[in-house]
Image: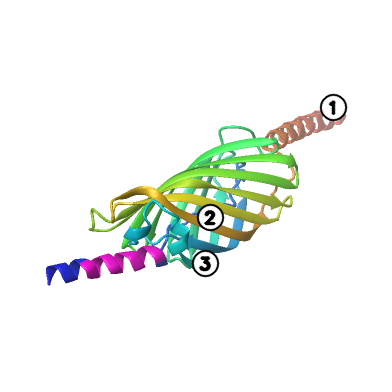
Amino acid sequence: MKKQLTYLFAAVTCIFFISSCASLTGFEEGRVLGEGNSELMVSGNFTRVPDLFDDEDLGGDSLSTAISFPNIEVSFKRGITDKLDVGLRASTNLNASTYLKYQLVGDNTSSFALSPGFEAGTVLGLAYNVGVPVYVTYYPAEAVAVNLTPRFMYQFITGAETSGASYLGGNFGLMFGKKNKFGIDIGYYNVGSTITGDGGGQSLVTVGIGGKFRFGDFDSSPKEERRTSKSDKKSRKRGKRGKKKRN
């Protein structure tokens, strides 16, 4: 009876992980939005997840026993400061998460930008995942973004110390547009499972198309805005002085 319950728990765990895979999509850029600006992102993705219980295929071509499924993801983020973005994300994988990124290199007009981030999510309170991505983007033109996002993520089931999976890999994508953008994203991850004792060798692949819709003032950089505000203040002071002299 105990052995049967163990197999039943393993089967339920496998199904749970497959249907509620952690969010491993890309579409994020190295640039942040800027204080007071917002962005809505919608993407359709296709994911191939390895069967973590296939003992015969461990160390081999895990895609031959992978399970494929589509999913839709929606995220909303807002610029808290000129360097920090905070967002929320939800998908039909039943995963909901929050994330942030802080821009260390470049600004919102530079051709190269880099922002480390942090993300944490849950699946109906039954499983949790934490991840550390690094968003790197090169802009060969203002309307073209080449994204590379290396990432490590770990997911575990509540109350099951031996049931977890680690994801190590990254995403590559292209985005086109200035304020509103559309593009593609491809992700590849090596998956290790503590359920089977497999330290790695399994492959997860995700492919998606998506669009980002921005709200706010993206026409000028924060530095330009500061210069403009300073010049406006000086003009107002000169105007006041002129009025006093006339009077």
Q: Which mark is drawn over residue 245?
A: 1
Between 88 and 228, which is closer to the camera in this rendering?
88
Near mark 3 (Cα within 10 A), the count class, few <14, some 14-19 or many ≥20, is some
Q: Quadrant of residue 76?
A: bottom right
Task: Quadrant for the N terminus, please.
Answer: bottom left
Asked if residue 15 is among those painted magenta in the image, a careful observer would answer yes
Near mark 1 (Cα within 10 A), the count class, few <14, some 14-19 or many ≥20, is few
Looking at the image, can residue 117 be seen?
Answer: yes
Asked if residue 13 is among those painted magenta in the image, a careful observer would answer yes
Q: Horizontal and vertical percent for residue 72?
A: 54, 66
Q: Horizontal and vertical percent for residue 43?
A: 59, 62
Residue drawn at point x = 54 percent, y = 52 percent: 187
Residue drawn at point x = 51 percent, y = 56 percent: 205
Q: Nearer the viewer, mark 2 or mark 1?
A: 2
Looking at the image, can residue 118 be seen?
Answer: no
Q: CA distance from mark 2 to mark 1?
A: 63 Å
Task: Quadrant for the C terminus, please.
Answer: top right
Magenta residues, start to end: 7-18
Q: Check if mark 2's residue and mark 1's residue have beta carbons within 8 Å.
A: no
Image position of 164 (left or right of 189):
left
Between 77 and 227, which is closer to the camera in this rendering?
77
Q: Return the residue found at the far left.
A: 1
